[in-house]
Amino acid sequence: MFTKNKLLKFLLVLAVFAVIDFWIFTTLRSSVRASAAANRSTSLVLLAKSAPENRDLLSDWLDSIPASIPDGAAVYLMPMEDDPEAYDAFATADGVLDLWNELSPTEDAKKGLESAYYFENYASPVKTELGGHTVSLFYAPIMDETESELLGIAVFFAPDVANASIERLLSLFAIGAFTLFAALTGISRFSRDSTVGFSVLVLTGLALVFIIFPLTEALRLSFISKGRFSLSIWANSFSGSHLQALWGSIRLGLWTATTSTLVGFLFAFVIHRTSTGGKRFLSAIAQLPVISPPFSLTLSIILLAGNNGLITRQLFGLQNFSIYGLGGLVLVQTIGMFPIAYLTLAGILQGLDSTLEEASLDLNASRWSVFRTVTLPLAVPGILSAWLLVFTNSLADFANPLLLAGNYRVLSVEAYIQVTGRNDLGGGAALSLLLLLPSLTAFFIQRNWVSKRSFVTVTGKPNARLVEIASPGVRAALTTTIWFIVAFILSLYGTIVAGCFVKNWGIDYSFTLSNIGEALSRGADAIRATLTLAALATPVAGLIAMAAAMIFVRKTFVGKRALEAVMMTPFAVPGTLLGIAYILAFNKAPLLLVGTGTIIVINYVIRELPVGIEAGVASLRQIDPSIEEAARDLGADEGMVFRSIVLPLLRPAFISSMSYTFVRSMTAVSAVIFLISARWYHMTVLIYNFSENLRFGLASVLATTLIIIVMGAFGLMRLLVRDTGAFDKTLTR
C-alpha cells in the first residue's frame, strides 16, 4: 500500500544504501587501480633494467618495447658527456619523439627528469593521447651494474593500467546490488504478499539472465562482422544454399508433423476410445521413443537398412538402395516423435464429453458420421497442437539429420557446421534464428485458427462414460495396424540390443562380448558426468516449474503475460540456437561458465522448464482455489500454502516434470553438444562419435545403457506416482 510516509522512508533507505554502495565501489576501484599501478611500475622498472649499455644495441631494445607494452612506446634519453643536463633522444617511432618534444618543456616532465637524475622512479599523473589510446608517462633511471652511474633515462608511454573489464565488473556489481536492494526493499514495504513478490523477482531474474540475455547476444552477434555492424551475415544466411537448407527443414517438418500426428491419433484413439486389449503395453510402447536417446532409432535404421544393413545388403543384396535422405529422416522422426502427438491427443480424446456422440447415435447417425462430424472436429485443437509440437521439434531436430541426412540439407545441421566447422558463431546464430520463422508462422496460424472457433462441450458435470464409435471391423483393422507399428518399434530397439553383441556390424556378425567392456570403460566418465548433471538439474527444474505455475495461475501482477511468454520461449527456440547463445553469453565476465558443469545444468533447467510449467498449470486449474483460501484464512502464509497444500496436490505433475527433465537431460544433444568439455562430457555425444566412426557395437552398448537408465527412472516415477483412476471413464459400446 503506497503512502507518503512509506514512500519517503523508502527513498531515504535507498539514498543511504546508494551512498554506501558508491563508497564501496569507489574504494574497490581505487584499490584495483593502485594495485595495477604498482604492478605496472614494477614491470616498467624491470624493463628499464633490461636496457643495453651498448649504444649499438639500443635500436633493438626500442623495437622490443611495443611487444612489452601493448599500445605503448618509449623514449630513451642519453645524457651528453660535455653537458649532463642535455641528452640525445631515441624513440620507438618518430611520432613518439615528436610527442616527447612537446611534453619535455612542461614542469611535470622536468620533475620526472629530475627524479631520474637522482636515481628515483617517477610515475607522472599527467595523461596524454598516443595512437588513439590514453597513456601515462613513467620515468625510470637506467644505471650501470654498480648502480652508481646514470647511463640514461627511459620515458615510458604506458596505457592506463586499470583493467577495464574488472572496472566494468565492479560497476555491474554496484548497479546490480543497488537494483536488487531496491527491488527487495520495495517488495517488503509495498507488497501485500512479499513471498509472491520475491518469487516474481527470482523468475524475472532467471528470465533476464538465462533467456533474454543469451538470445539477445546471439541476435547481436548476427549483426556484427569483423567487429562492426554489418548485414553481411544475414545476407549470407539468405543465400541460395542456406535457403535450400531452410526449405529442406520445412519439408521435413511438414512430412514428419503430418505422419506423426496421424500415427499419434491412431494410437490415442485405439487405446482410449476402443475396447482393445493390452492397452497398458501399447501405451508403454507408444512412449518408449520419448525416453530413448535420439540417436538410437537412427542407429537402428542404419544397422538394418544402411549401406551395409542387415536387411538391405545381407538379406536382399540391394546395391542401389539408400535409407539416407528425406525418406529415412521422415521414417525415423515419425517413430521418434509420434509419442509427442500421442501424449497430446490421449488427454483430448479421453476428456471429450460423449454426450454429443450419444445423441448423434440415438438420432441414427452412422459411426463414421459421428466420428467425422462430432469426434474429429472436437479433437481439432488437440490435433493442431500435436501437429505444431511435432513440427517445431522436427525443425529443431539435430541428432537424426546429423547421421541420416546424407545429401539432404537441413538448417539445424548447417548451423552446427557453421559453428564447429567454420568457427562462425554469428553465422550459426543467424541460421538458428532463421529456424524460428517457420515455427512462429505455424504457431500464429494455429492460434488464429483455433481462436475463431468454439470447442466447448463441458458446461457442467462431465459425462463419466465414453462411447465406442468404432465398429468391430474398423477396430480390428486399427488394432492390427497398431500392432504392426509396435512390432516395427520393438524390432528397432531389438536391433540396438543385438548390435551390442556383434563384432563388426555389416562385415563380421560373429558373437562377441568385447563391445560391452570397451564401451563401458571408454564411456565411464561420460556416463558418470551425464548422470550427475541430470540429477542436479532435475529437482531444481521441478521446484521452479511448480512455483512458476502457482504464480501464473493463482496470482495477478504487472507483466504477468510477458513473464509467462518469456519463460515459455525456450520450448520454441531450436536447441542449436540456445547452445550457441549460451556460448556467447557465458564465455566472459561476470558469468564465465563455459566449460563448467554449471552451464550444462542451467541449460537443462531452462530448456525443459516450459514443459514442467505447462504440467503444473494444467494440474492447478483442476484444483479448487478455495482449499488454499481456507489455509490462508487459518493464518498460513504463501510459503506454507505452497509447501503443505499446493505441492502435495501437484505431486503427480511435480514428479512428471522432474522425470521429463531427467529424461531429456540424459538424452539431450542439440544444445549440449556446444557446451560439453573434457571434464563434463555427455553420453549422447559419445554415441554420436562412435556412430560417425562406424563403431556401431560401442554405440549400441551406450545407447542400450542409456535406455536402461531412463526406463529405470520412469519405473521409479510410476512407483512414486500411482494412477488413482480418478479421471478414468467407462467405455461403453
Image (cartoon, rainbow, N blue to C red):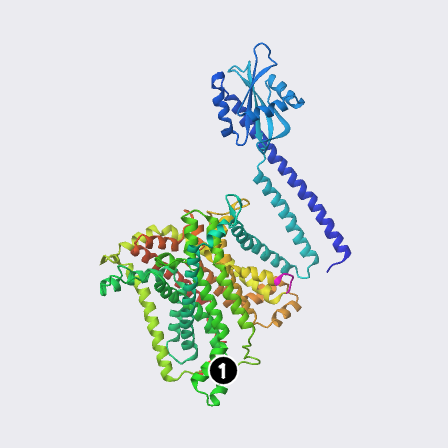
90 in the magenta segment: no
**Is 679 left, or right, of 1 in this rendering?**
left
Could you say where residue 3 lies in the image, as x and y percent from the top left?
76, 58
**Is 421 left, or right, of 89 in this rendering?**
left
Residue drawn at (49%, 86%) of the image: 358
Could you say where residue 672 lies in the image, as x and y percent from the top left?
44, 53
**Is 598 left, or right, of 171 in this rendering?**
left
Residue type, numbered disc 1: Ser
Residue nearest the observer in this picture, 363 or 647:
363
Secondary structure under badge 1? loop
Could you say where residue 132 lies in the image, as x and y percent from the top left?
58, 34
Residue 288 in sight in this render: no
- Quadrant (top left/top right/bottom left/bottom right) for the C terminus: bottom left
Find the residue positioned furthest to the top.
82
**Dot 1, how many residues are within 10 Å of its Cα: few (below 14), some (14-19), or many (20+)?**
many
With respect to residue 24, does 616 lie above or below? Answer: below
Residue drawn at (52%, 32%) of the image: 70
Could you say where residue 502 lies in the image, as x and y percent from the top left?
25, 58
Residue nearest the observer in this picture, 211 or 449:
449
Residue nearest the observer in this picture, 660 or 339:
339
Specify the quadrant of the image occupied by residue 89.
top right
Read off the magenta span: 556-560
Residue 137 in sight in this render: yes
For the image, the number of numbered tags is: 1
The residue that mark 1 highlights is: 354
With respect to residue 176, does 455 lie above or below? Answer: below
User: For the stretch drawn in magenta, what is the main secondary structure?
Assistant: loop
With respect to residue 554, does 54 lie above or below? Answer: above
Find the residue positioned furthest to the right.
4
With respect to residue 57, does 227 lie above or below? Answer: below
- Quadrant (top left/top right/bottom left/bottom right) for the N terminus: bottom right
